[in-house]
Image (tube, rainbow, N blue to C red):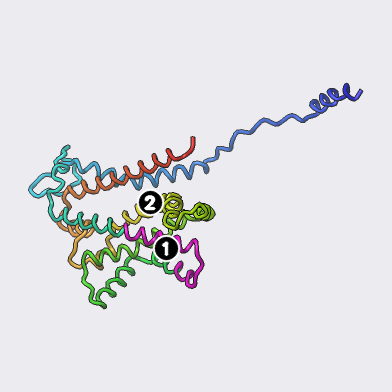
Amino acid sequence: MAIAEGPIALGEAQEQRPELEPLRPPNRRWTRFILPAFTKLVMIYLLVPIAIMILYTFNKTLGGTPKVTFRWNGFTTEWYRQLLGVPDLTAALKNSILIAFTSTVVATALGTLMALALVRYRYRGQTATDFVMFLNISQPEVVMGAALLSLFVTINFPRGLLSIFIAHVMFNIPIVAVTVRARLAGYDTTIEDAARDLYADALRTFTKVTLPLIWPGILAGALLAFALSIDDFVVTQFVAGTTVTFPLWVFGAVKVGIPPQVFVWGTLIFAVGVVVALFNVILQQRKQPG
């Protein structure tokens, strides 16, 4: 009897189940379009000047000394062929690349070690270290440049490539440290303990376990430091002395007219940044499972 009543009770329960109401269409209010529209406007605001710069690298110039003009005079690739046609500009760009590369290497190494120390250890003065690091990032560049100039003048330190290098390392270390520290958030140190249990020494544990895990943060910090160094103007203006970098040369050339090679170099630098970014995206996609 109980066996016969089971299906009947199940059927009655199904009949008594209330019907589900149909899903309502999403509310398409105009406010949901604000964020996408604002994002597109910001992207246009950022990319239009770069697009104009790239476009006018192919513009002819009329007259004797070639200078950038925003009147379209015809298409040409002459300025790409004469990329090294302005010796002073080429020398200034070499100085910028040299300082950016060397300062990035040193700042990345020191900033990574600082981030590891701040995350792993608790020591006296850690709060002061955090404060100084974020103060370095938040303070105006004018203040930093004036302070460094006063220091170099006080100790009679010669201003030139070395003083620019020291200044760029100083303001890049906190940038790298903050970036790597964000990557280390939630880092599981038991992985390193497991490596040591398998008889790996400290150096091997760092190179085989720690470094691969934090490498994306290190790379991001290094790229950011390089970008900040190669286009820095304010701090460099204070400590450069007679040395001229690419931003300083362009600032001086504005008074008499910018040669088209400035736009060409800017286009090439932008293209290198795009290639590096695309390479990083492709590399990250390949690392993802599936």
Sequence-wise first label, 2 or 1: 1
Name the residue tied to disc 1: 114
Q: Residues within 10 Å of mark 2 (few under 14, many from 20)?
A: some
Q: Quadrant of residue 97?
A: bottom left
The residue under the point 18% across, 59% down is 252
Residue kind at label 2, given as amino acid type: Leu
Where does the image place residue 160, in percent across and percent down from the top left?
A: 21, 66
Let me know if residue 51 appears in the view: yes
Let me know if residue 186 appears in the view: no
The residue under the point 46% across, 58% down is 181
Task: Give the residue at the far right of this rendering.
Answer: 1
Residue kind at label 1, given as amino acid type: Met
Q: Residues within 10 Å of mark 1 (few under 14, many from 20)?
A: some
- Image height of 92 relative to 146, above or below: above
Q: Nearer the viewer, residue 140 or 34?
A: 140
Where does the image place residue 177, in percent across and percent down from the top left?
A: 41, 60
Q: Which residues are magenta?
A: 105-130
Where does the image place residue 183, in percent across and percent down from the top left?
A: 46, 53
Q: Nearer the viewer, residue 262 or 272?
A: 272
Name the residue tied to disc 2: 219
Horizontal placement of 92 versus 11: left or right? left
Residue 48 falls within the magenta-colored stretch: no
